[in-house]
Image (spheres, helix red, strand yellow):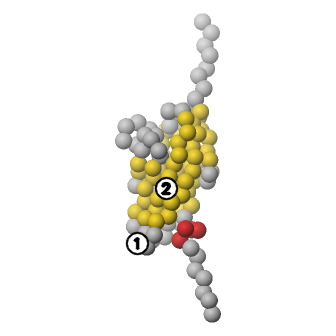
Amino acid sequence: MLLLLPSVTGEVEIEANGEQEIVFVDAGGVVVFSSKGLGNTTSVLWDFGRDINGPDTRYSNLTDVNHTVHASGRYNVTFTAFYEEENVVKKLVLIVNYEEEYQET
């Protein structure tokens, strides 16, 4: 008899504002990053690719984190769940749009 157990890598999921692969938000908007299916992880690390909400905000070791984003551009977000036997890495892309309203004088 062969017993197959679910893979650890198949259980971990991440999302930003409910989206799992790519999320678009306007500058000044709040982004809710969340993770689930972590099981017996020893720790986690979000890497937002650059400071996402001011100085020293590139990294977070919280399973769920909220950020208000102001700098427009692309953020390549990496989430790592650390386990005793292996690590699980998940990625998503955040696109922050900036539009300036034209004011007639």
User: Real-space Cα distance between discs 1 and 2?
Assistant: 17 Å
Q: Quadrant of the N terminus?
A: bottom right
Q: Which of 11 and 89 is in front in this view?
A: 89
Circle 2 sits in a helix, a strand or a loop, which is it?
Answer: strand
- Where is mark 2, residue-wise? 79
Question: Which residue reaches farthest top?
Answer: 105
In percent of width and height, residue 11 lies at 57, 68
Instruction: Provide residue 73's location: percent of width, then percent of height.
Output: 55, 35
Decide if residue 39 is in sight here. Answer: yes
| Amino acid type shown at disc 1 | Glu
Q: Residue at horizontal 41%, vertical 51%? A: 60
Tag 1 residue: 84
- Residue 96 quadrant: top right
Q: Residue at coordinates 60% horizontally, 82% vertically from top-left?
A: 4
Residue in view at x 46 percent, y 62 percent: 81
Quarter in which the C terminus is drawn = top right
